[in-house]
Image (cartoon, grey):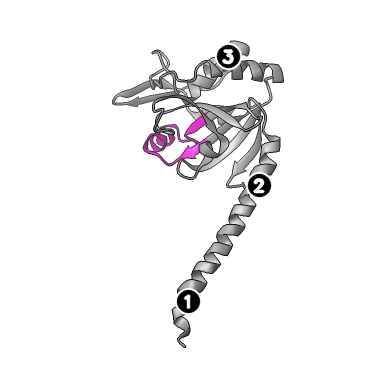
């Protein structure tokens, strides 16, 4: 009997064992993380789509997209303005599940931060405000023009309940893309946030 005939079968069995172990670790990790997430938490990701890569290139930051947790019961829900996360609802403000937001098809890495300067009441008020924006059109434009993209969605809601909220807008000068824009790095660099989680984990 020729042993090499069974090598592909053995290889597949070993792969299945590895994948099963990774799925179990991810599920356990996901369950533990869910207990730590609160309404108002910011969730960042570095995307793999073209628009995310462009945003990342312009900003020079670690992340290209941001959303906010608006519900944790019974499931974690994240509101964000996006171009193509959901092909049924393109170019608008949508609500995604946690798994949808961080799926490897969209995210190379992600992180969760908590704004310490906002109270629990304020976070709920901001969440309620954001929910009224669901379905509104995505508009990528400079600060001086009407706009609604991932960062400005959050920014405009936050300053309504915390008027002294300040983040650094970034000036860009490119054809068809010039003026002051707000990138996720401005939120990530805020001095009064606590990082809850990074994936991959930081060494």
Residue name at image x 60 percent, y 20 percent: 127
What is the x, y in percent for residue 109?
A: 52, 43
Q: Residue furthest left?
A: 175
Give the SS element for disc 2: helix
Give above or below for 107 relative to 121: below
What is the x, y in percent for residue 140?
A: 39, 22
Q: Which mark is residue 29?
A: 2
Ranked by sequence position, the earlier of labels 2 and 1 is: 1
Whether residue 131 sits left or right of residue 120 in the image: it is left
Taking depth in this image into account, of 80 and 87 the one nearest to the observer is 87
Bounds of the magenta span? 45-66
Whether residue 187 sits left or right of residue 143 in the image: it is right
Tell whether label 3 touches label 2 (CB within 8 Å): no
Q: Which mark is residue 7?
A: 1
Gap in angstroms between the C-alphas marked 2 and 1 = 33 Å
What is the x, y in percent for residue 19?
A: 56, 58
Ranked by sequence position, the earlier of labels 1 and 3 is: 1
Give the SS element for disc 3: helix
Gap in angstroms between the C-alphas marked 1 and 3 = 62 Å
Q: Residue furthest front?
A: 1
What is the x, y in percent for residue 84?
A: 40, 32
- Read off the residue under disc 3: 159
Residue name at image x 43 percent, y 36 percent: 56
Residue name at image x 52 percent, y 36 percent: 101
Nearest-to-viewer mark from 2 and 3 = 2
Instruction: Please check the rendered image and state whether residue 177 is part of the magenta-colored stretch, yes or no.
Output: no
């Amino acid at each position: 009997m020729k042993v090499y005939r069974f090598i592909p079968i053995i290889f597949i069995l070993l792969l299945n064992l590895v994948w099963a172990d990774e799925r179990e670790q991810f599920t356990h990790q996901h369950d533990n993380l869910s207990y730590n997430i609160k309404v108002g938490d910011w969730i960042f990701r570095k995307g793999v789509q073209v628009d995310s890569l462009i945003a990342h290139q312009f900003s020079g930051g670690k992340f290209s997209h941001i959303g906010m947790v608006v519900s944790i019961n019974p499931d974690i829900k994240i509101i964000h303005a996006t171009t193509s996360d959901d092909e049924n609802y393109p170019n608008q403000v949508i609500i995604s599940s946690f798994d949808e937001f961080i799926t490897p098809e969209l995210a190379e890495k992600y992180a969760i931060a908590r704004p310490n300067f906002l109270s629990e009441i304020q976070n709920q008020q901001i969440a309620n405000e954001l929910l009224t924006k669901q379905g509104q059109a995505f508009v990528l434009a400079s600060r001086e023009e009407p706009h609604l993209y991932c960062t400005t969605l959050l920014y405009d809601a936050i300053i309504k309940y915390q008027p002294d909220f300040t983040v650094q807008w970034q000036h860009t000068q490119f054809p068809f893309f010039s003026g002051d824009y707000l990138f996720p790095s401005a939120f990530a660099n805020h001095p009064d946030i606590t990082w809850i989680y990074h994936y991959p984990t930081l060494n």
